[in-house]
Amino acid sequence: MIPEDYIVYYRNHFLQHTFSLCKDFTTLKSTIHPDIYKIIRHDQEQNTDYANTLRSYLMNGWNAVRTANELHIHKSTFFYRLNKMEELFDLDITQEETMVAYEYSFILIEYLRKIKL
């Protein structure tokens, strides 16, 4: 009998495995959506927190209430930020394909940070 601690489920590691298959990290970095780079650059220049807000929203299953709670802000503040991001960066949060690309981008950024690239 194998203890549960020793069992590794692929579903928990498939993204890391996929990323590790790419030997050229420049190519891997190029798959990060350009809008995410724009938002991060804006945050750095204007001292805003839009990238973290969007990342939190995506990682919370696109749930506004959970996101506001995680960010310790009022729900109306969250919606203000979301509307401001749509305006500033021409985002369309109704486009599921784009939102998934943003989510992938944040996951990839976190992965690259963990491996220090």
Image (tube, grey):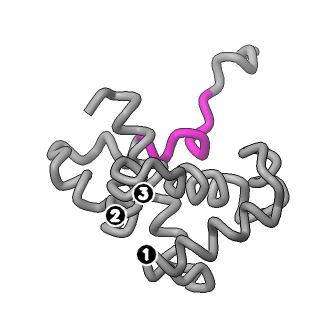
Queried whether the magenta region covers residue 13, the answer comes back as yes
Secondary structure, mark 2, is: helix
- CA gap between label 2 and label 1 equals 8 Å
Q: Going 53% across and 71% down the picture, which residue do you hit?
A: 85
First in sequence, mark 3 or 1: give its number.
1
| Residue under numbered circle 2 | 38
Magenta span = 8-16
Position of 108 compared to 76: left or right?
Answer: left
- The image quadrant of residue 6 is top right
Where residue 79 appears, as percent x and y from the top left, is 72, 69
Where residue 37 appears, as percent x and y from the top left, is 33, 59
Where residue 68 appears, as percent x and y from the top left, is 78, 53
First in sequence, mark 2 or 1: give its number.
2
Looking at the rendered structure, the kind of residue marked 2 is Lys
| Residue under numbered circle 1 | 89
- For the residues labelled 3 and 1, say whether their Cβ atoms are less than 8 Å apart: no
- For the residues labelled 2 and 1, say whether their Cβ atoms are less than 8 Å apart: yes
Looking at the rendered structure, the kind of residue marked 1 is Phe
- The numbered mark at residue 105 is 3
First in sequence, mark 3 or 2: give its number.
2
- The numbered mark at residue 62 is none
